[in-house]
Each structure stands twice: as C-alpha cells, then as structure tokens.
Image (cartoon, rainbow, N blue to C red):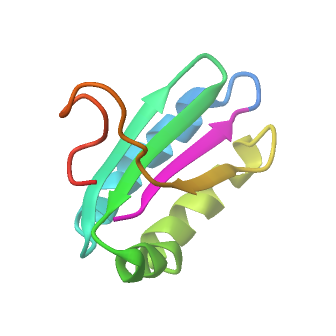
Amino acid sequence: MPVVVATIRTKPGRREDVLAAFRRHTPAVHAEPGCLLYAVHAGEDRVTVIENWADQASLDAHSAGPALAALGAEIAEALAAPLDVAVVEPVPYGEPGKDRLPNT
C-alpha cells in the first residue's frame, strides 16, 4: 500500500492560497477509489500531504486524475520551489500500532 509524502514550499504570503485550494479539491481526492488517507498539514512556509493508497494502481490513477491536475494548476503560481514528492514504505520499529500509519 503506497504511502506518499508531498511537501509544497509556498512563496511568502501564499500559504493560505494553497490551503484554500486543498480545501476545495480534497473532497474529490477522498472520493477516488483506493484513497485510504489524504491528510493535509501546514507549517509556516509549507504544506505537507500524507497519502496512503490501497495499491499502486489507485495511486497511478490519482496521479493522472482530474482532481490532482486541477489542484496543481491552481497552486502553481504559489510555489516557492518544485514539489518534493516521495513514495515511501513503512519500516516498523518499536511498539506495534505506533510504528506505522494505519493500513500500511
């Protein structure tokens, strides 16, 4: 089950614009087949999205789908740097249940 960590660095004063775009487009992503988690987090100069997909086919469909295309077009002018997107897998250490995202 693929886990994606995407970090979006925002231009000064543009973080709220990016968050507003995520508010508009996240419901469509949540409705995509195979979306187990699509959670937006924000820091001072960045927005980080943690995603969990049922399988690679679901992630591939999301990556090529209309919701992500619309979101990307909407936030493009607010980016301070290229997107940093990583597909990762759990490496469980420590106490079971606290060592990975649910569904991974």
**Position of residue 95 measured from the top left corner of the image (x, y, whole percent):** 23, 25
Q: Nearer the viewer, residue 69 or 50?
A: 50
Q: Extreme top residue here?
A: 44
Q: Residue at x 67, y 22 (%)?
A: 45
Q: Is residue 38 above or below residue 53?
A: above
Left or right for 49, reference 23:
right
Q: Extreme right residue here?
A: 81
Q: Residue at x 34, y 56 (%)?
A: 52
Q: Main secondary structure of the magenta part?
A: strand
Left or right for 36, reference 84:
left
Q: How many marks?
A: 0
**Position of residue 19 measured from the top left corner of the image (x, y, whole percent):** 48, 36
Q: Residue at x 53, y 59 (%)?
A: 71
Q: Residue at x 75, y 48 (%)?
A: 77
**Position of residue 14 measured from the top left corner of the image (x, y, whole percent):** 66, 30
Is 75 part of what is drawn in magenta? Answer: no
Magenta segment: 1-10
Q: Extreme front residue here?
A: 94
**Position of residue 25 measured from the top left corner of the image (x, y, whole percent):** 39, 56
Left or right for 82, reference 10:
right
Question: If the image is split into quadrants, where does the N terminus sit?
Answer: bottom left
**Quadrant of the image occupied by residue 97:** top left
Q: Is residue 37 above or below residue 30?
A: above
Question: If the image is split into quadrants, where does the C terminus sit?
Answer: bottom left
Is 8 part of what is drawn in magenta? Answer: yes
Q: Nearer the viewer, residue 8 or 36?
A: 36
